[in-house]
Each structure stands twice: as structure tokens, then as C-alpha cells.
């Protein structure tokens, strides 16, 4: 059998790969999607993913542009206000949506419904072949194409493509000629949904506690998603507590601003490690999403940045004047400085809010007070966190690619 030829092969049907496939549905491009897990195991692991993700305004617009927002909105809770504070200190900053003039600062949505809706959205897409379960096992680059070896239950075979987009979450980096830098924060995230005894009115909290940054994201009803960054010892202590002792520890560290925590759903944990490609592309190969930059979740930016990246990539792919190697270079020129800035700022945030040295508490306080009392700084911070500072492409303005 002759090897099939594609314009684009996307490896990985996670949130980033799937969202890119869907964005390219109407394009005159022959696309293949490769996913290692069967759709059944993928939906089982999606069900086991109890995280809530904060979608920025730019991500909401992306999903609107690719026609999925009306399906997502019943699962999403708007964030109307963000409150940032430092436990045991007087400083805090308030970021209300009114100061940005948007209906919401972002939306909180379960990773499970989000994945399921995006992954179901391209079934029957006419320009797409899906290989699943199939694993990419070898990449060979030639002048005019890349040759890819796929392994399936019935054996190995090759396909060819003008462009390879790796959205594999960084799980198959040994196949690529691209360097990666890693940084272990020595931290993990404790994830848990909790009920409270009062309405939250769409208020999200970021509180810097003695044990690490603690985020409360508003869910539907009187519920919050807790994302608590902890060192490994504190994490295992908290995982070992029974529900009522855990709620007490959470209440003691967070305080009473959100009301009384009354019930905790099962807790889970995620190891936090930064993985970053100084140059996530070469020749006809591009890495996107976690494959290019796996970030600390303190500012909830990993997926949001990945969606902004693929919005730019999708727009470049509609430009028929660009040949493949120059398209990769153009993408890197546009996206690398943005990715590097966000990674630096996230690392600075993690380091400054995990630092227990004398004087740091005071500095953090002054920083929060300055943010709260300096309107231009506040507006800029809000535009940055909502992705609006980086939303020039069509999809990020909520517009279809060729409308
Ligand atoms: C605790 C926590 C909280 C977070 N909160 C937020 C948040 O609030 N907001 C936000 O924007 N981001 C958040 N993030 C980040 C976000 O979850 C990730 O950035 C995003 O899910 C990455 O998706 P991806 O598609 O790039 O990778 P993945 O989800 O890892 O998908 C990769 C896919 O590739 C497949 N694959 C791998 N190798 C191969 C191969 N060789 N062949 C075929 N298939 C392959 C895998 O099976 C998988 O399906 C958070 C992360 C964590 C850990």
C-alpha cells in the first residue's frame, strides 16, 4: 500500500491538538490526527481528570470562533472578580471585571466536559483522517516532507506530511531533534472541589499562604475548585487527612472571606515541573501546547497560551503564500518572544510567592498594594491575564478563519 500524504499531521488529541484540528475544519488542507490512546481510554482518563481550568477571555473567543462556545457555556462559570492576598499581611489587590469593561474576566470549566466537547467536535470532519489508537514512533525529515512511522495494533506503517505539529504534551520528545529545558519546582498541586455556605458571585481568589499559593475558582452553585501548590511533604500530609481535618486546614490557611468550607470532594495531586523548548520548531516540525511549554499553574496560563499559539498557527496555515519551512520560521518569530515573556513572569511569580526569606512578605505586600492603587498597572495586569494583550489573530477576536 502506498504511504498516504497529508498537508499537516497533528500528533496528540489533547486539548491543544483537538482545538487546532477543529479550527482547520473548513480549510483546504488534508489533515491527519494521531492519538496513542483509544477514544475509550481517553474518555476514561478524561473522567479521572477532576481539574477545573480557568479559560481566559482570549480562549473563550477562540472557542466561540470555532463554533463550540454555545456547547461549552452550560458547563462554564464566569469569573467576575479576582481577589489576590497574602496570608497574615494587610496587602491585597482587587481585579473587578468592571475595570476591564468585559462581561467576565474568564470562565472556569471542568477539564472533562471541555475535552469531551472538543474531541467530539471533529467527528466526520471531511478534511481529516484520525489514526487512533496509533502511536508516532519515528520521524524522518526530508527536503520536501516528513516521513512518520505509526504503530497500531495491526502493525507499523508510514505516512508523509508537509508539516508535523507535535501536540503530544511532550511525551515523545526523544523522537525530535529539539532541545528542552526543565525546571523542577519541588512542588505539586493539590486539587479538590469544595462546597461553601455562601454565594460566591463569580469571585475567584489567589491567596499566598505559608504553605504555597492557593487558588479558589468559582464553580456552578456554591462550590469552588481548589488548586493549592504545596511542597511534597505538606502535600502528602494533606492527602492523608480525613475530609473534615482537611477542610479545617484549608479554612485555617484561607480564612473566612469565601464563607465556611462545608464539604470536600476527593483530593488528587499533580506534580509541577516546567518544561520549555528554547526553540519549539525546526524545518517542517513545530511543537505546540505542553509539548513546547509546560508551565506552573499558578497563573492558570498553560492552556490559554497554547490556544493563543495555535490561533496564530491556524491563521498562518490559511496564508497560501507561505511555504512550509518559512511558515515555521514565521510562527517562531511571532510566538517565541510571547512564550518567553510569559514563562519568565510565571517563574518570577512562583519564586516571589514561595520565598519565605525575611523581608519578602513585606515586598509582596507592597507589590499587592501598588497593584491595587495604580489604575494603569491594574488595567495592564488584567489585559495580560485575560490574554487580551496577545489577541491580534482572527480566532482570538472571536472571528472564523475565513469569514
Ligand atoms: C494542576 C493544573 C492546573 C492547570 N490549570 C490550568 C488553568 O487553569 N488554565 C490553563 O490555561 N491551563 C492550566 N493548566 C495547564 C493545562 O492543563 C495544559 O496546558 C493543557 O492541558 C495541555 O494540553 P496539551 O494538549 O498540550 O497536552 P496533553 O493534554 O498532554 O495531550 C497530549 C496528547 O498526546 C498524546 N500523545 C503523546 N505522545 C504521542 C505519540 N507518540 N503518538 C500519538 N499520541 C501521543 C497523548 O496520549 C495525549 O492525548 C493546568 C495544569 C495543571 C497540571
Image: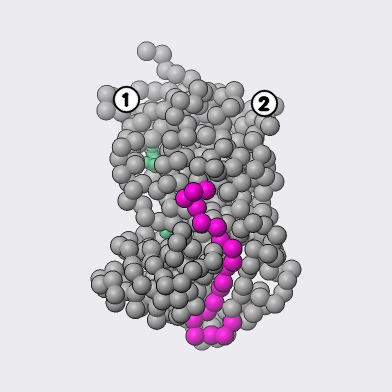
- The reply to whether the magenta stretch includes residue 80 is yes
Report whether 260 appears left or right of 238: right
**Which stretch did the figure color magenta?**
73-91
Q: Tell me the quadrant of the picture where the C terminus can be found.
A: top right
Give the structural element (helix, strand or loop) at label 1: strand
Q: Which residue is mark 1?
A: 156
Question: What residue sits 46% from the left and 72% below the top?
Answer: 198
Q: Position of residue 369 (x, y in %)?
A: 64, 79
For the point 64% across and 59% down, the residue is: 384
Q: Which mark is residue 382?
A: none
The residue singled out by tag 2 in the image is: 320
Label 1 to label 2: alpha-carbon separation: 33 Å
Residue 74 in magenta? yes
List the single residue furthest toward the top.
1
Image quadrant holding the N terminus, namely: top left
Q: Secondary structure at mark 2?
A: loop
State which quadrant residue 383 falls in: bottom right
- Near mark 1 (Cα within 10 A), the count class, few <14, some 14-19 or many ≥20, is few
242 or 338: which is nearer to us? 242
Above/below status of 86 relative to 403: below
**In the depicted structure, whether residue 26 falls above or below residue 260:** above
Q: Nearer the viewer, residue 160 or 213?
A: 213
* Disc on the earlier residue, 1 or 2: 1
Point out residue 241 in the picture as x, y percentages from the top left corner.
26, 73
Protein image colouring: one colour
Is 259 displayed left or right of 308 in the figure? Answer: left
Asked if residue 42 can be seen in this view, the reply is: yes
Q: Nearer the viewer, mark 1 or mark 2?
A: 2
Which residue is located at x 67 percent, y 31 percent? 402
Q: Is residue 189 left or right of residue 311?
A: left
Where residue 300 appears, as percent x and y from the top left, is: 51, 59
Query: Looking at this view, is 283 or 215 the one in front?
Result: 215
Amino acid at each position: 500500500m502506498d504511504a498516504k500524504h497529508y498537508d499537516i499531521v497533528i500528533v496528540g488529541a489533547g486539548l491543544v491538538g483537538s482545538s487546532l484540528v477543529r479550527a482547520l475544519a473548513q480549510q483546504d488542507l488534508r489533515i491527519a490526527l494521531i492519538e496513542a490512546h483509544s477514544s475509550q481510554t481517553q474518555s476514561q482518563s478524561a473522567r479521572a481528570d477532576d481539574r477545573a481550568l480557568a479559560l481566559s477571555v482570549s480562549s473563550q473567543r477562540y472557542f466561540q470562533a470555532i463554533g463550540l462556545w454555545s456547547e461549552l457555556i452550560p458547563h462554564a462559570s464566569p469569573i467576575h472578580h479576582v481577589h489576590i492576598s497574602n496570608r497574615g499581611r494587610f496587602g491585597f489587590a482587587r481585579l473587578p471585571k468592571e475595570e476591564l469593561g468585559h462581561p467576565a474576566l474568564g470562565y472556569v470549566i471542568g477539564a472533562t466536559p471541555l475535552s469531551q466537547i472538543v474531541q467530539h467536535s471533529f467527528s466526520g470532519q471531511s478534511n481529516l483522517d484520525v489514526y487512533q489508537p496509533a502511536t508516532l514512533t519515528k520521524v524522518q525529515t526530508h527536503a520536501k516532507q516528513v516521513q512518520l512511522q505509526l504503530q497500531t495494533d495491526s502493525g507499523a506503517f508510514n505516512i508523509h506530511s508537509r508539516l508535523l505539529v507535535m501536540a503530544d504534551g511532550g511525551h515523545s520528545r526523544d523522537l525530535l531533534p529539539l532541545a528542552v529545558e526543565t525546571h523542577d519546582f519541588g512542588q505539586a498541586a493539590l486539587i479538590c472541589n469544595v462546597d461553601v455556605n455562601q454565594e460566591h458571585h463569580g469571585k475567584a481568589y489567589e491567596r499566598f499562604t505559608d504553605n504555597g499559593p492557593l487558588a479558589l475558582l468559582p464553580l456552578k452553585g456554591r462550590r469552588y475548585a481548589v488548586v493549592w501548590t504545596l511542597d511534597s511533604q505538606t502535600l502528602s500530609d494533606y492527602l492523608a487527612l480525613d475530609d473534615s481535618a482537611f477542610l479545617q486546614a484549608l479554612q485555617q490557611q484561607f480564612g473566612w472571606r469565601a464563607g465556611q468550607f462545608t464539604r470536600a470532594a476527593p483530593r488528587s495531586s499533580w506534580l509541577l515541573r516546567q518544561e520549555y523548548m528554547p526553540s519549539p520548531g525546526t524545518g517542517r516540525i513545530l511543537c505546540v501546547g505542553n509539548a513546547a511549554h509546560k508551565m506552573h499553574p499558578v497563573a492558570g496560563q498553560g492552556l490559554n497560551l497554547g490556544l493563543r499559539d495555535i490561533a496564530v498557527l491556524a491563521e498562518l496555515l490559511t496564508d497560501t503564500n507561505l511555504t512550509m519551512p518559512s511558515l515555521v520560521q514565521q510562527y517562531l518569530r511571532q510566538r517565541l518572544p510571547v512564550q518567553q515573556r510569559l514563562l519568565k513572569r510565571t517563574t518570577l511569580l512562583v519564586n516571589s510567592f514561595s520565598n519565605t526569606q525575611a523581608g519578602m512578605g513585606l515586598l509582596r505586600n507592597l507589590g499587592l498594594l501598588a497593584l491595587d492603587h495604580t489604575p494603569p498597572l491594574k488595567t495592564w495586569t488584567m489585559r495580560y491575564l485575560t490574554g487580551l494583550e496577545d489577541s491580534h489573530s482572527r480566532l482570538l477576536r472571536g472571528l472564523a478563519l475565513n469569514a
